[in-house]
Amino acid sequence: MRLRKRPGAIEILRERPEIVPPRPKELRGRWAGKQSLHVELGTGKGQFLTEMAEKHPAVSFIGVEKIESVLSYAVERNDQQDNLRFIHGDVAELGDYFADGEVDRIYLNFTDPWPKTRHEKRRLTYPTFLRLYERLLSPTGDIHFKTDNEDFFTYSVMYFSQNGYHLRNLTLDLHENEPEDNVRTEYEQKFAERGQRIFRVEAYLPIS
């Protein structure tokens, strides 16, 4: 679905440099200080991270989003959370934004499944990205992955395993017995209202 361009979106981002740093690459290695650093890739309108930041004030949260029209809504949503910032940028440049071992958790929430084979390399669970995450994650870091697309989930679980990740808390229907601490995204809420299943898994690398 083509997203409409929001008039004034880029101005909204520029007006909040404390939330959307204009030169995020200069903060590489210095995002969180002594706090844990959790990063959502493709943060959309920010519902998930805003609620997470409210629930976990001792954690630093960063949302990465390249579409300024979408990100502008997330910025407007965040009025009070000092532990939440955003990067207006491309996930492919994560290594320029974060230092090796700097990130404690990566959230992949309902990212584009890119179902056509010719677009496989764009999937955020493709091996190229998984190797990048391996570099950026701390020794005890992990990836939390949620999707409504069963084929994409099966694909991702396979590639997590083939690339050395271990799996835990795998569920084929998250909302059947929804955990009390689950925070829903905008898409997740819509899918739940339609009765669609939500697939979820946590992936981590064993400590050598």
Image (cartoon, grey):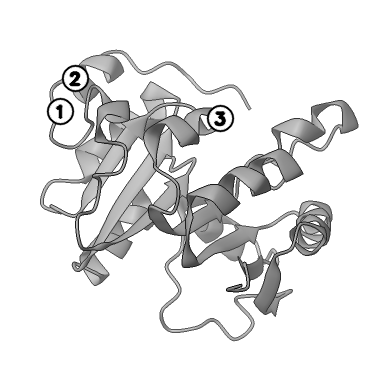
Closer to the eye: label 3 or 1: 3
Which quadrant would residue 17 be assigned to in this image? Answer: top left
Mark 1 packing: few (<14 Cα in 10 Å), some, or many (20+)?
few
Name the residue that disc number 2 marks. Answer: 14
- Kindly identify the residue that appears in the image at 20 percent across and 68 percent down: 58
Query: Does dot 3 land on a helix, a strand or a loop?
Result: helix
Query: Does dot 2 land on a helix, a strand or a loop?
Result: helix
- Name the outermost residue toward the front: 208
> Label 1 sits on what residue type?
Pro
Name the residue that disc number 1 marks. Answer: 17
Whether pointer 2 and pointer 1 mark residues with C-beta atoms closer than 8 Å, the reply is yes
> Label 3 sits on what residue type?
Ala
Q: CA distance from mark 2 to mark 1?
A: 6 Å
Which quadrant would residue 22 be assigned to in this image? Answer: top left
Q: Tell which of 44 and 204 is nearer to you.
A: 204
> Label 2 sits on what residue type?
Arg
Is 206 located above or below residue 134 in the figure? Answer: below
Name the residue that disc number 3 marks. Answer: 92
- Kindly identify the residue that appears in the image at 43 percent across and 84 percent down: 180
Mark 3 packing: few (<14 Cα in 10 Å), some, or many (20+)?
few
Whether pointer 3 and pointer 1 mark residues with C-beta atoms closer than 8 Å, the reply is no
Q: CA distance from mark 3 to mark 1?
A: 22 Å
Residue 181 visible (yes or no): yes
Is 207 located above or below residue 98 in the figure? Answer: below
Q: CA distance from mark 3 to mark 2?
A: 22 Å
